[in-house]
Amino acid sequence: MSRTYKATGINLKTQVLGESDKIVTILTPEFGLIRAVAPGARKHNSSLGGRSGMFVVNELLIAKGRSLDKITQAQTLKTYPGLAKDLGKLAASQYLAEIVLSQALSEQPQEELYELFNEHLHRLEALSSTNASGVLAHLAHGVFHLLALAGVTPQVQVCCLSGRSLKPDFTDPNWQIGFSVPTGGTICLETWKRLRTEGKGESNNQYPIPHIPLSIPHAQTVVVHRQEIPLISSRLGAMELALLQHLSQPEIMQIDGARDHNWLSVEQILRQYAQYQLGRPIRSATLIDSYFAANHDATI
């Protein structure tokens, strides 16, 4: 069996190793996630220096090792220089990379994930404007599509309690809908309130178990089930719901009236949901918060 193999991959993460090497985590369509040493990549004149950078796509020749494989050759196929030139785009790209790292498998083809990630990096880089809305909109779009690929898309078209379709009401400025992270999506607040009203007075939110005399032979305990009252993680208005409902589309839909704070609300809802599904925090999200705060300060 050959001790070397070829792969095409995009760099998602780098770590320092020793005095001059790097460990690069690479997403490949052929083999999924690969962790490989880039020997001498930190040296000033190393041919692997630039090729081991973040979001660089290389054609690789890799030698198998006992614990870590080693990159022996790398030919760059594509880079995303526009991402490094803008803090918002870079933060959004790192945010998406964290989700990809949590979803990707090793030693299994990951073609769809590879293509989807590169597509959203391309869209972020191609943004003509560097305003917060554009970055947040493309970030939310990417997060939603990655969740969809993993099969854990939040339900945003219907109420998770009643199953009824939800349509944003722009005629009522006070109209709101609930979003429950543990339940997995949107919740009609009227239905939720009705359940809470019906559940008042019940001990521990459970129906009592009927008393059955022990003298009755072969008596069976009757357990009464009812719908749990979910926790509302956040509330959103008509615009936020409209934006969420359009994220499943291949392209971002332009909705008149959408503002920075609307996209920020959508991103924060998806962030909470993604972190719940992944079971870990998205550390790059703090950079998005800093970027949005800086842009907000610059406009007032």
Image (cartoon, rainbow, N blue to C red):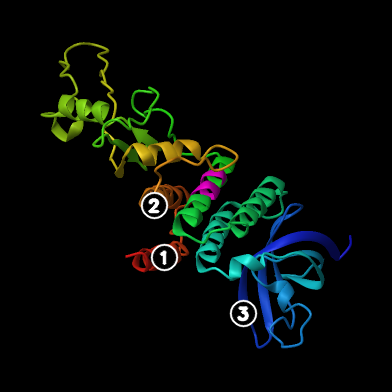
Residue 208: percent from the left, percent from the top? 17, 25
- Mark 1 vs mark 2, CA separation in Å: 11 Å
Give the image quarter of residue 82: bottom right
Mark 3 is on which residue type?
Val
Q: Which numbered tag is attached to residue 259?
A: none
Looking at the image, residue 93 lies above or below residue 211: below
Q: Which residues are magenta?
A: 140-145
Mark 3 or 1, which is nearer the eye? 1
The residue that label 2 is drawn on is 268
Q: Is residue 186 above or below residue 38?
A: above
Q: Earlier in the sequence, mark 3 or mark 1?
A: 3
Q: Amino acid at mark 1?
A: Thr
Q: Main secondary structure of the magenta part?
A: helix
Q: Which mark is residue 16?
A: 3
Q: Quadrant of the N terminus?
A: bottom right
SS class of the residue under badge 2?
A: helix
Q: Earlier in the sequence, mark 2 or mark 3?
A: 3
> Farthest right residue?
1
